[in-house]
Amino acid sequence: MVRSASDTRERIVAAAAKLFYSEGIRAVSVDAVAEKADVTKRTLYYHFDSKDDLIAAYLETRDQPNLAVYRRWFAETDGDLAAKVKGIFDNLARSARHPKWNGCGYLRTSAELANMPGHPAIKVGAAHKKNVEQWLAALFEEQHLIEAPKLARQVVLLLDGSFAAVLLHRDPNYMETAGEAAAALLAAACKDNDQIALTGS
């Protein structure tokens, strides 16, 4: 069966994603990715100029799927805005209880490349985090919350902080606690909005 170039590229990225996420980007060689993808090293380099490009591609493929999962968790959680945002954290905590969970691939990659701020994967990771922040800001703006962009940034900080804490302590309760903090922030913001609406000031 003849494989198309796009199929081969997708298989390489999928193999890289499994290895990079489970073992770390520095620990995984290009040879290991080629072997797992069942391609030659030459074929891998036909599709990717370097390992750096492959790392960036691995993260790029996770951007929209990750956002889609957040949107689904938000939509499927019953309750008001605060409860729905807390639902994202609660679902993340459930994911973190899976034995193969190894934290946020974007944050882990940025930690491994901390001395290389211009690396393409760092740029991809920053763009993904900004996409999450902008999505939250848009949700909060729909509710006419004051300082919606600032609230979104605070929630993202709680998200990323909880990723780090859970990876360090291996205790998903940290994620649930962060969700409670995010819910409290939003409940207070909604209350302030209601008060302003009542007083007209």
Image: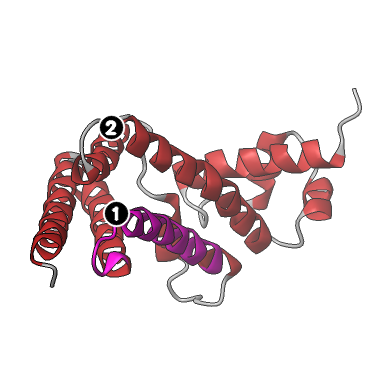
Residue type pointed to by label 2: Thr
Residue 158 lies, in percent from the top left, at: 23, 57
As drawn, the residue found furthest toward the right would be 2
Q: Which residue is mark 2?
A: 77
Residue type pointed to by label 1: Gln
Q: Secondary structure at mark 2?
A: loop
Quadrant in which residue 119 is drawn: bottom right
Front one among 131 and 43: 131
Q: Secondary structure at mark 1?
A: loop
Q: Which residue is mark 1?
A: 143
Would you say residue 137 sits in the magenta stretch? yes
Decide if residue 120 is on the left or right side of residue 49. Answer: left
Q: Estimate how packed mark 1 is, as few (under 14), some (14 to 19) or many (20 or more) residues with alpha carbons within 10 Å.
A: few
Residue at horizontal 40%, vertical 64%?
A: 111
Residue at horizontal 31%, vertical 56%?
A: 140
Residue 29 lies, in percent from the top left, at: 61, 51
Decide if residue 138 is on the left or right side of residue 82. Answer: right
Would you say residue 174 sits in the magenta stretch? no
Residue 189 lies, in percent from the top left, at: 16, 60
Quadrant that contains the C terminus: bottom left
Quadrant that contains the N terminus: top right
Quadrant in which residue 11 is drawn: top right
Decide if residue 50 is on the left or right side of residue 91. Answer: right
Residue 8 lies, in percent from the top left, at: 79, 38
Q: Which residues are magenta?
A: 123-148
Q: Is residue 77 above or below residue 128?
A: above
